[in-house]
């Protein structure tokens, strides 16, 4: 589902209005969709309170109130401002019948408090996407009553007091949010999404045609793109993944990535690591095919292994390069050889990205599809921007880098961003701070290379990997707490992450 800014939404609505779909028609469609949702999802609710503002969001609320009254519900409209400032909303207010109770706050505060206390459902149609700054005191007072109520609380577009610019004191704490036309950033980005509850999109009669842009996917939509597991499959069906990783000082990176790949469905996993790590790697991942490689004096993979490495990679559908390898000229030579000769899907992470930062020209004329998985510090080194600059404009920076270099970018962080070269940017919704620990990125790389080996295209690979990684972290946090969710424990929670998607269908 697309994620649009308020400015883009207003532009689309104006274009639709100019084309003959009137603003009135859109408002009626929005209100009708919301009323139908309430009648279907909360059919036993009898006492319903609608909080209405003075703008178009309030107009949606008046439409909802009229239709719920017509459906024989006991409806109370609480106006937070005397009269609508929008002519369209005023016309919808005028269409209310005498069967709908109308109160104005703060004048009717006592009656409003009584109605809220009796409500089964409370709908917030006060500001929608038009909120900024701080909430007026009368809205805060009503929100406090609503938040302490046992009623189901439904926000229309956005909870009053919530915007990407901040969360106001005494915001409306929604259990559910009904978003008109599309998703908004507040529905996806934490901590704002935590204020919205379960989000559902309500059509308003506009078909959005867009070849690029910001979007997110529901768990059911993600489940559809999981690799298929036919009943008559064998290990060859699910592809062979290679992991080029590790060094004398960081042998665990190869192990963590390999375990992530094994637990994500690849048919075969081959680990290519410095021979000084043989005992640790071989004993930790017995399911994997091991390829010990000659080592430099300081314990890194030597460039003398290029021919051996390329020969081994020739049978692998996907490969990962960089986890725990360290930075060296030998590493740069290896990376250049792989980029120029390997024809599968290549995930470059960690020290692979650090090597690229000093040799960015290697991304020109690659033989393979390249997927980069930087954290903000590594993205800073790739782009020359500060970490602060990267974090301030994550979607644009990831998209611009992907387009410029013809690569796929997964920019890690809260609400991980995945960009393809065509300008599409996916925002991930899973994850928690249990993932903020060493080895977490290696696990993500293992998940990604496994999905790519099973035939997923680069964009879907990174989208699925980001969600599964985050969902495993959430499960580990529930089982072990964020403090004790070691990377090994997060890996143990990958089955729950896959199950979560499968059960969403």
Image (cartoon, rainbow, N blue to C red):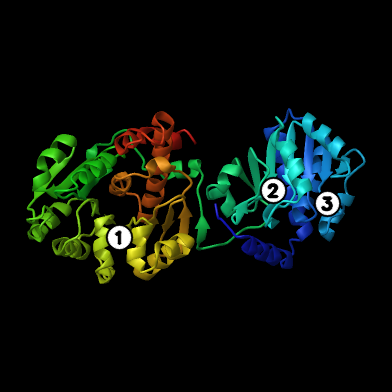
Q: Is residue 188 left or right of residue 48?
A: left
The residue where tag 2 is placed is 160
- Report the mark closest to the observer, 1 or 2: 2
User: In front of the other: label 3 or label 1?
Assistant: 3
Relative image position of residue 406 (x, y in whole percent): 35, 67
Residue at 17% over, 64% down: 337
Depth check, front residue: 379 or 428: 379
Tell me if I can see residue 66 in this picture. Answer: no
Q: Residue 407: horizontal and vertical position, in percent? A: 34, 63
Position in image of residue 189 (x %, y %) = 53, 50
Q: CA distance from mark 3 to mark 1?
A: 55 Å
Using a 10 Å C-alpha cutoff, classify the residue at mark 1 as few (fewer than 14 neighbours), some (14 to 19) or many (20 or more).
many
Which residue was labeled with disc 3? 81
Mark 2 / mark 3, whichever is N-terminal: 3
Label 1, on which residue?
Answer: 370
The residue sitting at the right extreme is: 98
Packing grade of label 2 (10 A; few <14, some 14-19, many >=20) is many
The front one of 271 and 196 is 196
Q: Position of residue 248 (x, y in %)?
A: 14, 48
> Circle 2 sits in a helix, a strand or a loop, which is it?
loop
Q: Is residue 122 left or right of residue 240?
A: right
């Amino acid at each position: 589902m697309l994620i649009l800014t308020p400015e883009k939404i207003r532009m689309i609505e104006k274009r639709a209005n100019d084309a003959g779909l009137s603003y009135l028609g859109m408002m009626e469609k929005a209100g009708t969709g919301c009323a139908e949702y309430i009648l279907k999802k909360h059919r036993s609710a009898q006492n319903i309170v609608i909080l209405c503002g003075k703008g178009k969001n309030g107009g949606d609320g008046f439409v909802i109130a009229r239709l719920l009254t017509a459906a024989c519900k006991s409806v109370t409209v609480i106006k937070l401002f005397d009269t609508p400032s929008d002519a369209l909303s005023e016309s919808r207010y005028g269409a209310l019948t005498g069967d709908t109770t109308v109160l104005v706050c703060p004048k009717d505060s006592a009656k409003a408090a009584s109605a809220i206390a009796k409500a089964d459902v409370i709908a917030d149609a006060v500001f929608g996407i038009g909120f900024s700054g701080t909430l007026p005191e009368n809205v805060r007072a009503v929100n406090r009553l609503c938040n302490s109520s046992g009623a189901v609380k439904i926000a229309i577009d956005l909870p009053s007091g919530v915007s990407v610019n901040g969360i106001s004191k005494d915001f409306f704490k929604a259990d559910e949010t009904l978003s008109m036309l599309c998703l908004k950033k507040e529905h996806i980005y934490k901590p704002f999404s935590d204020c919205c509850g379960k989000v559902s999109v309500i059509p308003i009669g506009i078909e959005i045609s867009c070849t690029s842009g910001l979007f997110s996917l529901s768990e059911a939509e993600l489940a559809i793109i999981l690799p298929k597991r036919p009943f008559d499959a064998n290990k060859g069906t699910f592809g062979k993944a290679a992991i080029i990783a590790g060094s004398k000082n960081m042998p665990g990176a190869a192990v963590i990535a390999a375990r992530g790949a094994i637990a994500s469905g690849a048919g075969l996993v081959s680990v290519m690591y410095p021979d000084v790590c043989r005992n640790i790697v071989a004993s930790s991942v017995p399911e994997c095919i091991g390829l010990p490689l000659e080592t430099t004096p300081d314990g890194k993979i030597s460039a003398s292994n290029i021919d051996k490495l390329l020969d081994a990679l020739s049978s692998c559908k996907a490969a990962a390069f960089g986890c725990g390898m360290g930075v060296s000229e030998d590493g740069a030579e290896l990376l250049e050889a792989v980029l120029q000769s390997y024809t599968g899907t290549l995930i470059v992470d960690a020290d692979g990205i650090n090597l690229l930062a000093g040799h960015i020209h290697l991304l020109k004329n690659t033989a393979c599809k390249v997927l980069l998985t930087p954290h903000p510090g590594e993205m800073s080194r790739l782009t020359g921007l500060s970490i602060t600059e990267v974090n301030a404009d994550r979607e644009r920076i990831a998209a611009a880098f992907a387009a410029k270099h013809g690569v796929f970018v997964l920019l890690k962080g809260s609400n991980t961003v995945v960009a393809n070269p065509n300008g599409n940017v996916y925002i991930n919704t899973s994850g928690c701070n249990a993932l903020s620990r060493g080895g977490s990125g290696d696990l993500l790389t293992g998940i990604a290379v496994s999905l790519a080996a099973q035939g997923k295209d680069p964009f879907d690979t990174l989208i699925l990997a980001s969600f599964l990684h985050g969902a495993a972290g959430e499960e580990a946090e529930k089982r072990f707490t964020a403090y004790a969710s070691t990377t090994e424990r997060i890996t143990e929670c990958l089955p729950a992450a896959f199950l979560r998607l499968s059960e969403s269908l």
